[in-house]
Image (spheres, coloured by chain):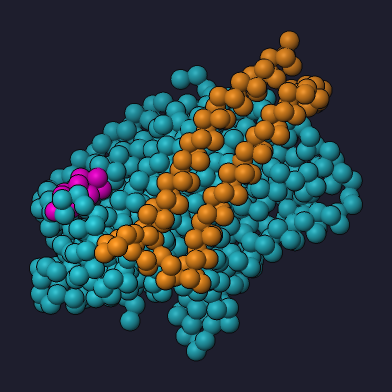
Chain colours: A orange, B cyan
Amino acid sequence: MSSSVYHRIRVNPKFRELEIQRSRLAWLFSAIVLAVYYGLMIVVAFWPNLLHAPLSEGRVITIGVPIGAAVIVLAWFLTGLYVYRANTTFDELNEQILSETQS
Amino acid sequence: MKHPILAAATSAALPLMSAAALAAPSAGAAETQPISVTAIVMFFVFVLATLAITYWAARHTKTANDFFAAGGGITGFRNGLAIAGDYMSAATLLGACALVYGRGYDGLLYVAGFFVGWPILLFLMAERLRNLGKFTFADVVSYRLDRTKMRCLGALGALAVVFFYLIVQMVGAGELIQLLFGVDYTYAVIAVGVLMMVYVAFGGMIATTWVQIVKAVMLLFGGTVLGILAFAKFGFSLETLAAQAVAVHKSGAKIMGPGTLLADPVSTLSLSLGAVFGLAGLPHILMRFFTVPNAKEARKSVFYASGFIGYFFLLTFILGLAAVVIVGTDPQFFQGGRVGGTLVGGGNMVALHLAKAVGGDLLLGFLAAVAFATILAVVAGLALAGAAAISHDLYANVLRKGRTSEESEVRVTKIATLAIGVIAIMLGILFKGQNLAFLVALAFGIAASANFPVLLLAMYWEGLTTRGALWGGLAGLTSAVVLVILSPAVWKAVLGNPAAIFPYDHPALISMPLAFLVAYVVSKLDTSAAAATERAAFGDQYVRAQTGFGAAAAAKH
């Protein structure tokens, strides 16, 4: 586990690729989740009546209900998508980097 | 008039909820609610089962790695369940249902804030945490920084969160058990403390994990059965349910949209920053990431955990609305039979009354046992995180500078667990009947303002130095404590001053950015030779964080 091994990994172009791909996905998804949640909270604070509108003519359920639930569902969906990408593409790349380094 | 029982049990239920958040007034308090034989039987079955698990776990716990990280051999799915069991604290079921019952849609928005931290924890922290750490999050912050100083800071942040959170749990537990089983408060607190010590001291992380898994399964099962039975009364139609709820609720159609709970943007922002980023600074949650074999399983655990938690949060919305119709119109659940008056047993009893109404004594007894199991699972996780901070961070790495045997580290953990248990029992008795909403604000405030910024910067920012991390962490910790003292919950409610100096109950809006700012500025100004070495060491740490090369491996089990 010498520093030189870490250095060899670092200069591997595949490491650069892994790094870029993963951080792009992680920051993009984080931004989406936070934007959706805080976006909703801004509507709640400044335009609450928008969320009181009925889902369709004559219904009691408001559009706020599916939107609120969608925040949770979307956040979970992105979690699944990230785990899928990370556990397939990224891990495969990672395996390649490690095996190239050790050989 | 806010009642202490309501405040304590509620804050135990939904971590950040201020006592004022609940509209439902509390009951003629100390009135106990002797519950059926079913509840007692189920409760004993649970305790015996968990003790059997502990006995089994104790025989499989040999090394420090077994003790703190269950040998790193927990699968992602099981760890996901355990995380859900660790996070959904003393009756999320009770607090969230009561909130929806009282305030409708605001309850849904409120729990959503407690969900959003999970994806962020996954995207930005989970895999790096697993790749860099061994037993505690202080492993990660001290990776390339000064070991002694960073371990002390990490342990301080961890212990502060653990103790503040533990007091809330103990007091909530005592009052809830008194209410549910008619057991005297003091005995209830002692029983919870003793069981917690037994699980953790003998069974370590393996027993704690399985107690949390059993509890999570019980909670999900009980909640689902309750949801199906209640929703069936409305033909599984959300529209029918909503129409009837709106027809009988005192706020009418208003409950289907945002109300007053989260209407103040600044207050809501401060609350949600604590909820979202505090999650990534809770030591007992972070510790769970070291129980899995690798980063792949760490990611999977978040996926499963957030699935269970999200499902349960959405379920509570249905349960709360159903309770508005079923419990809210039934005189047997109100004191003196006055519908719309005070609920028997207080505002937090909504879910249990609903269980009685749709599932009779059997379901009521089961849910009461679930509530108890929930408390035990959470306090066990907290006690283990606290004990690990004392023995792994302070004893093994600071006091003995890493020159210690695994046996002595585990022995110190056991002593630390007993000490934490005794202190928790004493604090639980001492704080009886107090309004503890401020302690929850403190626990999450410190997690978001001291632990999270230091952890994030240590993993992401090459420029962070020991001096910067130390000053930043302490600035976050101190400002969180000071702001909570100046907040309405302490300055006005506890100290009796006419007006609070800091107008918001939650400090994260100020204290979290302050921690980042101080850490940044001090690191930038740090020109010491040590700082240069620390910056240079980032490269290797970064490669390990990304690839897991050199990461602590799973033990053979």
Quadrant of the frame with the N terminus of chain B: bottom left
Residue B541, percent across and down?
A: 73, 34
Viewer-closest of B202 and B496? B496
Image point 41% across, 31% down: which residue? B77
What main secondary structure does the magenta stretch of the protein show? helix
Q: Can see residue B428?
A: no
Q: Quadrant of residue B344?
A: bottom left
- Vertical side of B266 occupied by B547: above or below: above
Could you tell whether A33 is left or right of B517 in the image? left
Magenta-span inclusion, residue B229: yes
Q: Which residue lies at the image location 63% right of the left edge and 68% below the top edge?
A: B510
Q: Which residue is drawn at 39% across and 61% down?
A: A64
The magenta span reads B222-233
Q: Is residue A14 left or right of residue B354?
A: right
Q: Where is residue B12 in the image (x, y as percent from the top left)?
A: 38, 60
Q: Seen from this angle, which residue lies furthest bottom? A: B498
**Which residue is rendered at x = 77% and y = 24% of the image?**
A13
Q: In this view, does B129 lie above or below A62?
A: above
Residue sitting nearer the eye, B487 or B330:
B330
Q: Position of residue B234 (x, y in %)?
A: 16, 54
B114 in magenta? no
Outermost top residue: A103
Point out residue B427 in the picture as x, y percentages from the top left corner: 42, 63
Number of marks: 0
- In the rendered structure, the answer to whether residue A87 lies left or right of residue A2 reads left
Q: Is residue B470 visible?
A: yes
